[in-house]
Image (spheres, helix red, strand yellow):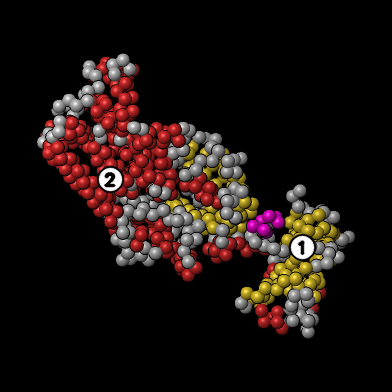
Amino acid sequence: MDWQALTVSLQLAVFTCLLLIPLGLWVGRMLATRQFRGKALCEAAVALPLVMPPTVLGFYLMLSFGVDAPFGALWQRLTGSGLNFTFSGILLASLVVNLPFAVQPIQRAFEGVPNNVREAAWCCGLSPWRTFTRIELPLVWPGLVSALALTFAHTLGEFGVILMVGGSIDGETRTLAISIYDRVQAFDEAGAGIMSAILLAVSFVTIGVVYGLARRGRGLRV
Amino acid sequence: MSDPGRQSSPPGLDVRLHQPGPIPLAADFRCAPGELLALVGPSGGGKTTLLRAIAGLYRPSGGHIRCAGETWFDAEGGVCLNPQRRRIGLVFQDYALFPHLTAQANVMAAMGHVPRAERAVRAARWLAQVRLEGLESRYPAALSGGQRQRVAVARALAREPRALLLDEPFSAVDQVTRRRLQRELAQLREVIDMPILLVTHDLEEAAALADRLCVLHAGETLQSGPAEALFRRPASPQVARLLDKHNVFRGRALCDAKGQGYLQWGPYRLEAELPASVESGAEIDWYIPPSDVVLHRRERPSRGERENPVHGRVSELIVLGGIAQVTLSFDHTRDSLRFEIATHAARRNGLARGERVSVSLLASGVHIMQRQD
């Protein structure tokens, strides 16, 4: 059992959720409530990781993370280290890959909040921020929980992009999914089986817990 | 902090808005404290847009909105207060209650101006005011349509607004509940003293509840006044049509040597009071309320029959319970005249389709409208 790989996977999933959910809230709400030029293009860009082969996405990310590419060079200048084959690199890649899993459920949830409920809150004297925290956020709670569950579970299982960007460096970029692949390559089926079962259990429990929370949130309104 | 919007202006709500598009507006009306003004007109006539502009949810390009001495909107002065600063109570058509909050929490949400410790007690009091005692802890999903409407009214009043805006508040409930809620609104008016604007397309409702009606079409206020005055004296054929008034005809104004005014309608010379602005010989439109059309009895002619008698043929007779709606057509015009009589009176007079009958058009009811074109 590769405990370090499990730790890397969990760290990656937690950091991805922590960074992506606030971003998903902002982007999802904007896409749901505002009309602007290029909105369809934005939605397409958000959904792109869903339809792109992970290796292709990983390949482009690997190129743009390189020190020869503008983004990779900027990162190098700001932090003093590169992105490819580092935890920061796979975290950034994970943020890109999981964007649709975080944004789309939140966007759908915001679309389900009638505009006049928002306006009623303003007429009640609630500021836009108070309207967001007291009215909108509780109403989009199930969508938020779905986004959290999908992002967490998808990050735990992500393989292609992580392998392309991070390789398989022990304690740094080797996640549980990559470790399972390595064990299978080394004909260690027993090890791969144990880790697969753990990944399955962690994913199942996580999704169970968050969906349970979402149900409790919904139950309060009846 | 001094309020930049505060300035001296008459109490009540003063609205003058205009813009060429995208939603045309040419509205000009006032609503005094304690007065209920109904904005009536067809769907898409700009009623809800006006309400949204007053609430600060829509920004027109020209005009002003003043309320209780404050300027909420002034296009020229660049003033446009946001909805939070307007202290408005708005009851949405579908109530727009917060579905995740109880009835009491919905009302408390509008009490940002009240000390936190007092909110629950005062919210319960507002709910009691609208007869919802015992339902404070219910969520909107567990309330009936009428109860939701009451929560929405309580929430709007809990804001202690300077004006109350009601956007078709009775349209989403059944007939029985509607009547009850209308009665409750009439009772509520006795304890609140602020301008109330009611948007409705139900003319009966407007006439029953409002002190004055304001007729709107394509965002333009065509006429304002008490219901009875509007129904008897519409300003134009368009207003008459919008108020569902049928008896609009074309004629010619005439004046005899003594200065007595007449109305020439085909072969008929009708007594009528001509407005001073109408010249003899001018083409005019005229209207007669159905209540001022008197059927001549076949068996027992009376002296009243000498007043503006006209003769026509019954082209339609529709019995609606105890009331029969009679439509008369004439030889000289394609326009028809409608009036209502008791069904038993229609039977007694042998009214039937195709029958020739005579009616009197009471001179006091004939209303002359100067033609605009």
Pick whichever, B325 or B189, lies toward us: B325
Spatial separation of the CA atoms under disc 1 and disc 2: 66 Å
Residue B209 colored magenta?
Answer: no
Crowd band around label 1 with a 10 angstrom C-alpha radius: few (<14), some (14–19), many (20+): some
Residue identifier under label 1? B335
Secondary structure at numbered mark 2: helix
Q: Give the range drawn in magenta.
A: B236-242
In the image, what residue occupies the spot 15% across and 40% down? A193
Of labels 1 and 2, the one closer to you? 2
Image quadrant in which the N terminus of chain B is located:
top left
Residue type at mark 2? Val
**A60 horizontally vs B83: left or right:** left
Residue A186 shows in the view: yes
Please, what is the three-letter code of the amino acid marked with disc 1? Asp
Q: Residue at x 48, y 33 (%)?
A: A37
Same chain shared by disc 1 and disc 2: no
Q: Is residue B245 above or below residue A61?
A: below
